[in-house]
Amino acid sequence: MSDSMKFVILGAGNIGTLIGAKLAQLESIEVLIHGRGEHAAALALNGISVNGIDKFNLSPDQYLISISDVETNSVFDGLADYIFITSKAGDVEDLLKLAKRFSNKSTRIIVLSNGLGHIELGSSEFGSHRIIPATTTHGVWRKEPGYIEWAGLGSINFGQTMNSPDMEQLSELMSILESASLNPTWSGEGSAMIWSKVLINIAINPIAAITGKTNGELLKDGMFETCTEVMLEGAKVARLEGVSLDDDNTLIDNLRSVLEKTKDNMCSMLQDVRLGKPTEIQFLNRMIVNKAEKYGLFTPLNQLLSELIESLSLY
């Protein structure tokens, strides 16, 4: 193997495919993309087609592919410099175990999946000094297997928790991501960064999934107030956990801004419910309910939404 920097993308759906494709365009960067199903098969056979914010095609010889349903590619075993986990929340635990085969004592792991609990899980597997808290706001959707639409230019946001790497230690990674036009930013306090995204997700995803509404339709009177109340239940829990959040009015303004910017979006939980796929509810609203119970706090709206989504997932 060459001395080039090696990135592994585990659980490559839409956002993982975008990150892998943009990194694979850079010289001195080698990328292994690990996925499953028809999408991974298309990446292996036909390459990657990106449209939208950027428009380009990659042939399969410009990156390495690994397909979970077939066989895990062993070329990067023990050699990865950075591992991105970009899967649905329910797959993170299994992918953290898979990450061990690609890692060595200096490999750093970035979990971009939605929800709470991933940093703690990763820290127990690898140590907190190797886990990088991160979120992303890039908007990506899949037209068909192998074809992704980069619909919204966002950022990849990094922060620090406990003993995780600081900004100086991440300067190399951020420089590479900047070269790949993926807009890395430093958010400072990692827990607040992750919770801020979770609060948006708990407010939007289950209500959109139950009502079948686009994000913009949640701005209507009554609907927006309900979204706000769900979010503020979660904010109470975050503050009890010692997280330094913005004040409630700022959180409400942020929620409104996200809904306006993504007004035409059909959120992922609504898509999952319609396709009969598992949702991320247990890592979002259900996690809020469980954490609240530790403090003797009742979160009725999050409890109700969790039960409704869980019941929908049974059919």
Image (spheres, rainbow, N blue to C red):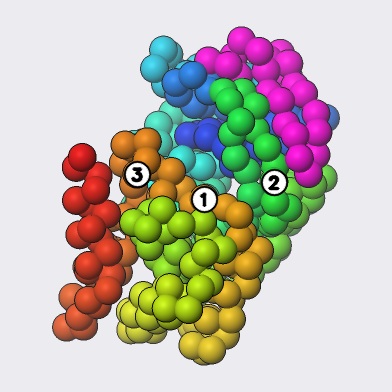
In which quadrant will I find the N terminus?
Answer: top right
Q: CA distance from mark 1 to mark 3?
A: 11 Å
Query: Which badge, 2 or 1, is on the more N-terminal residue?
Result: 2
Give the extent of the magenta segment. 41-62
Judge left or right: residue 187 versus residue 313: right
Residue type pointed to by label 2: Ala
* Pointers 2 and 3 in contact (C-beta within 8 Å): no
Q: Nearer the viewer, residue 160 or 86?
A: 86
Q: Position of residue 88 (x, y in %)?
A: 42, 43
Residue 147 shows in the view = yes
Where disc 2 sits, the SS reads: strand
Q: Which of the numbered marks, if any, corresponds to residue 51?
A: none
Q: Position of residue 41 (x, y in %)?
A: 53, 15
Q: Is residue 56 magenta?
A: yes
Tell me whether circle 1 and circle 3 mark residues in contact (CB < 8 Å): no
Tell me the kind of residue under disc 1. Met
Q: Is residue 51 left or right of residue 15?
A: right
Q: Secondary structure at mark 3?
A: helix
Tag 3: amino acid:
Val
Q: What label sits on residue 273 in the rendered view?
A: 3
Task: Tell me if mark 1 has few (under 14), some (14-19) or many (20+) residues whose alpha carbon lies within 10 angstroms of its own.
Answer: some
Quarter assignment of residue 176: top right
Mark-to-mark CA distance, 2 and 3: 22 Å
